[in-house]
Amino acid sequence: MASRKYRVKDIRLAKAGRLSHEWARDHMVILDKTIDRLRKSKPLRGVTVGMCLHITKETSVLLLAAKELGATVAACAGNPMSTQDDIAAYLATRGIHVYAWTGQTKKEYSQCIASVLSHKPSILVDDGADMNVMAHFDPRFDGLEVIGATEETTAGVSRIRAVERAGKLRYPVMIVNDAYTKHLFDNRHGTGQSTVDALLRSANLLIASKRIVVVGYGWVGRGVASRCRGLGARVIVTEVDPIKALEAHMDGYDVMPMANAAKLGDMFVTCTGQTGVISKAHLLAMRDGAIVGNVGHFDVEIDTAFLLGSCKVREVRPGLDECVMRSKKRVYLIGKGRLANLVAAEGHPPEVMAQSFSNQLLSILYILKNHKTMETRLYNVPDSIDVRVARDALAAMNVRIDSLTEEQITYMNSW
Amino acid sequence: MASRKYRVKDIRLAKAGRLSHEWARDHMVILDKTIDRLRKSKPLRGVTVGMCLHITKETSVLLLAAKELGATVAACAGNPMSTQDDIAAYLATRGIHVYAWTGQTKKEYSQCIASVLSHKPSILVDDGADMNVMAHFDPRFDGLEVIGATEETTAGVSRIRAVERAGKLRYPVMIVNDAYTKHLFDNRHGTGQSTVDALLRSANLLIASKRIVVVGYGWVGRGVASRCRGLGARVIVTEVDPIKALEAHMDGYDVMPMANAAKLGDMFVTCTGQTGVISKAHLLAMRDGAIVGNVGHFDVEIDTAFLLGSCKVREVRPGLDECVMRSKKRVYLIGKGRLANLVAAEGHPPEVMAQSFSNQLLSILYILKNHKTMETRLYNVPDSIDVRVARDALAAMNVRIDSLTEEQITYMNSW
Amino acid sequence: MASRKYRVKDIRLAKAGRLSHEWARDHMVILDKTIDRLRKSKPLRGVTVGMCLHITKETSVLLLAAKELGATVAACAGNPMSTQDDIAAYLATRGIHVYAWTGQTKKEYSQCIASVLSHKPSILVDDGADMNVMAHFDPRFDGLEVIGATEETTAGVSRIRAVERAGKLRYPVMIVNDAYTKHLFDNRHGTGQSTVDALLRSANLLIASKRIVVVGYGWVGRGVASRCRGLGARVIVTEVDPIKALEAHMDGYDVMPMANAAKLGDMFVTCTGQTGVISKAHLLAMRDGAIVGNVGHFDVEIDTAFLLGSCKVREVRPGLDECVMRSKKRVYLIGKGRLANLVAAEGHPPEVMAQSFSNQLLSILYILKNHKTMETRLYNVPDSIDVRVARDALAAMNVRIDSLTEEQITYMNSW
Amino acid sequence: MASRKYRVKDIRLAKAGRLSHEWARDHMVILDKTIDRLRKSKPLRGVTVGMCLHITKETSVLLLAAKELGATVAACAGNPMSTQDDIAAYLATRGIHVYAWTGQTKKEYSQCIASVLSHKPSILVDDGADMNVMAHFDPRFDGLEVIGATEETTAGVSRIRAVERAGKLRYPVMIVNDAYTKHLFDNRHGTGQSTVDALLRSANLLIASKRIVVVGYGWVGRGVASRCRGLGARVIVTEVDPIKALEAHMDGYDVMPMANAAKLGDMFVTCTGQTGVISKAHLLAMRDGAIVGNVGHFDVEIDTAFLLGSCKVREVRPGLDECVMRSKKRVYLIGKGRLANLVAAEGHPPEVMAQSFSNQLLSILYILKNHKTMETRLYNVPDSIDVRVARDALAAMNVRIDSLTEEQITYMNSW
């Protein structure tokens, strides 16, 4: 199965991919710090790592870092639409076993994950849990010996937790998403900015004064709401969690049920990790010209079956489909309802991914070192890794901070 | 010891206190919802509750609520300077055993806590841990039978955790501070706004364009930084925790060591719960006319010994002391270094305290119901209480939100 | 008439007034720069200046500056409620002919203006045009020889323009309000901050998440809206001018007619200089507990006749009247509808007034120097004064800027 | 000379251009309101209008509107790099005499202006004054009979004023740039957003926490500064005008000379209309990796001669050139120093251009109606047009506002 060592759209794109990779790497110096500390010892020598991640310029830096530390790396896309084909080509020329191109069918997408697993990786790095789910439940991989895995996203954590709750977990999984230096920055600043970028590129309308409905006020929703407000939008938040709803309200946003928001919004961004948060009924209630997009993980947040299946569809701008309903009302869908910030923009900027991927790389090394004593359960990233990444990030940006004095340490431990 | 039933500055202030109480109560409808649900059953009948809290108009609503639900209530001040004397007087006329006035000596402050404990309370509600510490370590109260306690603040939690680590905890303590509906709102929005209020009242200078140094970027620091920026200030943050420092940096603030910030700041606000975060060396480095204030818990964050002991001091505005150093440089200290937002302003606004005190009231009831099965350790406020308070708060502000559909609940539990 | 040299509430307050004056002066170094340049030449020697201004700590710095430059100064209050009595007392002890106290009747207020005019000032400095109107139309002052006047506020400019349009202007008037270094800072930053201060002091409620209706989106309204948003409020703007309404909308605020806003608002701030912008009908439509205040010039913006005349009124907090309507609904009025930021707070901070008053002082000197060639009309403050004040302000805050190069000057004049 | 009726890159792009045009038109309903009012009367019948504007999807709506109202329209590009070739092709198919493509040489750019003038337009619509300057000073067009012209930009106004000051103006020019509904929205919100868009597309780096230097604090600079801050940047402003510098400082930005800012900035955006504001010396002082771009009018604001002429240059991302200095330091230049928001993004969003172009269209009609009585000088757009556009804009966004009552009109005219 692993006879073919890579599969990409066009290997000739490698030259462009190299430029793009270098641009990312130049802005991911945090990761360099980790690599520099370990380059000589090559701690990943002999280890095969399987990675199911968005194949972007930023990801290429992680993949080549793992290789530089000695690993054999096999990688596929975390989403059928999110691959940057020039990067995939470049990775192939650099010896990564990459199975990824943009515009995959669902079947091709699954096959690529299988191709990665056929390399018999002992450590899995996952984004959304598709690879971990296949490794657990696809009989072809029953014998796969995995010593540990990581998960990058809120959506994937939710799925792998369900596997754990069902008592079916087969190996330890480190919840990279929950590291502070990951979700406080990647989910908030990364998705916040790249979502705005996606709105600008796909619709190119004025954001100032527009009513933008942010569906879900987790870390992603917070980031999106904050950045849209920063561009002058009037933001509406919808939520199911009363504590998050209260936070949004106190942050000065209008909070209301989606049924009401549907009538008011000019643009809608789903950030929930849930299914069906913008339903057919909501779409029918929207004003003519409304724009909807998703930056949660899967393309199930908006009822795309209705928009793309029951409406008259034409692409009016790159990545933007006009969906005309029977009533002649038009709703515009960004990137077929898939991750708008990856499909219609370039995903998170490199500085943010450098933090996320430092957590990934340090977690891989943690698994390698500790797997013999780890239990088969979900693990938080240890504080020491989180603090390491934060210190590296501050150093990379030349930010210096204070330390506790002896007196303060004593004070902290007294009553 | 309990022969004297209250001690206040001037009982004739009760009339003014009543107006002030009513204003607060009108804006604390969240708490009303809890009271309304329980008024008939009087669940606190026969229970004596001892409370060590800032005696403000907002606190008066909690104290009278506990009484309304059947409790005998004894209360003292959480800080020698923070009591609103009209409120204390009003509480005394309403049958609360209140021992509080503004401008207490340290000795008087301690005596008041002892007066409350001499009422033999079985449940303690504390703000800063002074009462819990006395109940644990003062031999006069060795025989006190406490079934449980609560703690309101970050600083108090830190102390009571130290007691627990030392293996000396005598009863379960519920960490009300860590409830989401407490610290996300009280520490951030409450202290954020009341700190700005304190700066305006004590100094009455233009905030816009001023360099304000926020020392510590916990929830309090975040709130203060955000509100100062909202008034146009240029905010500098100092931190010892690299993750928090990184967050502040990404939030767009200038992050630097205090030694650098000391030279740049026009105003300084300490928000750490630590000791000595603005030292004599920092004070000596400040520019002529710098203003320093503290909104952490204790008056140890700024070196007030130097400012008030070694400088030439005169009060130039109510709550603002001019401290002239030997070099003739002037630094201005708000409220003697005690909680500026309580000493120079009125503390948190009622809407915020309604959430905190709903958590307190529900935690008291939780202890009463569950104490027989609770272990002697620190407890988080259960999610059910947190969610209850959030729902009450949203209802009080007429904010409606969505609920999960059946389909979404199923989705959430699948992989 | 001028036999009595001053009239203040209590001359014994002078000591407190001195401290307050010094605090202001320390933060008005811009004005010091002008004084320093002219102290020796005493250009105002022999000139009597009549000033009708809010008698605050900041104003005391201007009055004493004029005296320091040689003038005889007579001053009265710009508003019956805005005088800081300690400042008035201090000014009296320093040789200013001051006729001002807080809580004047309308008659007393007029008498004080007359008292100032009876000193036969040749230059008038006005805030709201009451003194200029009396000098024009009160037969007692028909013979008054005025060589020029200044006007500080938008409201006063509007009135004096009406006098000019009617062909009745008797002497040149310099429109200090329209100097950039005045209205861009005083009206916006000064009133913006001091209005927030007034809301905090009078009501002490949480601003975050509240709906605050800003009536009028001139420079004052902009400042108020921006600062309220900065504290987390959800701001609604009402306007009659379509261009200003469009700006507010693009700035991300909700813009709607007052009839709609009346039903939604938690707090209302009038900033129009108009009459009747919150009418009885609007008040009847408000929600129970709504708070209304005015920071325009005169107390005619809100229908206070209805609130104070037809409702049941009691003061629930200092400066805050509860007005209970027949329907039992309560609306709360700040400072009887007079300038809330002066009545319930301390007016603009000194740094801002230093700019406004530098314009005043330089305009007085300009009149003195140029009055023989000036026409009887309204004058803008010359650019040279505006730029002078800006340069002094930047210098006072240690801000350095670039200069045009020779090449750039040439480029600017080419096509 | 006019034998060739258009010149575009590739007429086959017309189909894509039509989609793009329709997207813009759908979001420019303000302009539709004007067209609808005049469609029947065809007031521009028999008039040839020459337009020198950025040929974007938004401009296509203006050009076709003029045609719809009866005009013969000849158009060329306002910048050699800013033409959207698909739009140019579409316009050609719709009967516009369009001479524009992206990537013109300076000579081609001039020839295209000449081609437009050879159509003998009687009204000129200009963006930057190149067409007006050629009409005035190129001997080929000495006999051209122009009844009036308009100018769209700050930079162009500056040039045409220089022509007027030199006494060489040949026909009245309406300063569309100075209409409130133009510069308050187009320069601020339009350039603000499209500049952020250009930064995201060309560099795709994290904006949050970056130091962005905004050179010039006119309306464009204000917009750019505000939007960059809205995305979390730390903004530094440089200025030569002390009043604008003071405003920037009070708005909370760090203001300093360029020589200092050069060392600190991560990104630089010039917004001045001046020449040489980022000089070779500044470029040499920058940190490795700094990014510079221009959104003023001409490509003279940054020393591109040094960057593109004396450094080693390669394009690392579309629209982003890496310039390696002798010292090996790298500075990155967006779009060769030409208007970044047009070259690296799509220019202003349609809603904003609808306001600007409504002013243009109404000014053309104004010239046509009034030219016989107009003097040969610069004219402001009359208030009536400004108010008309504002009312249309509000109506297009369903925003309703209040009107003055009779009582208020009387009040306004009294004293």
Image: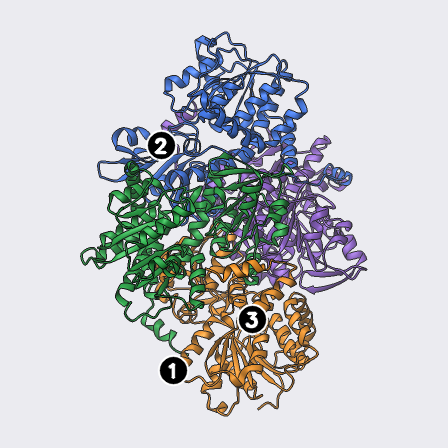
Chain colours: A orange, B green, C blue, D purple
Q: Position of A179 compared to B23: left or right?
A: right
Q: Please name the residue that numbered disc 2 is placed on.
A: C302
Q: Are marks 1 and 3 on the same chain?
A: yes
Q: Please name the residue that numbered disc 3 is placed on.
A: A384
Q: Earlier in the sequence, mark 1 or mark 3?
A: 1
Q: Which residue occupies the foreground of this view, B304 or A91? A: B304
CB under 8 Å between callouts 1 and 3? no
Could you say which quadrant of the image residue B8 lies in? top left
Subunit ID for the residue under disc 3:
A
Against D162, is C211 above or below? below
Amino acid, disc 1: Ala
Place of residue C287 in the rendered image (x, y in percent of width and height, measured from the top left): 30, 43
Question: CA separation, marks 1 and 2?
Answer: 65 Å
Q: Are marks 1 and 2 on the same chain?
A: no
Secondary structure at badge 3 equals: helix
Secondary structure at badge 2 equals: loop
Residue C329 seen by the camera: yes
Q: Quadrant of the C terminus of chain B?
A: bottom left
What residue is shown at x 42% (from left), y 85% (from top)? Answer: A168
Subunit ID for the residue under disc 2:
C
Q: Position of A277 compared to A341: left or right?
A: left
What residue is shown at x 67% (from left), y 76% (from top)? Answer: A38
CB under 8 Å between callouts 1 and 2? no
Q: Please name the residue that numbered disc 1 is placed on.
A: A166
Q: Which label is found at residue A24?
A: none
Against A297, is D372 above or below? above
What residue is shown at x 46% (from left), y 62% (from top)? Answer: A221
Q: Which residue occupies the foreground of this view, A243 or B404? A: A243
Place of residue A140 in the rendered image (x, y in percent of width and height, measured from the top left): 49, 91
Q: Which of pointers 1 and 2 indicates the residue nearer the eye? A: 1
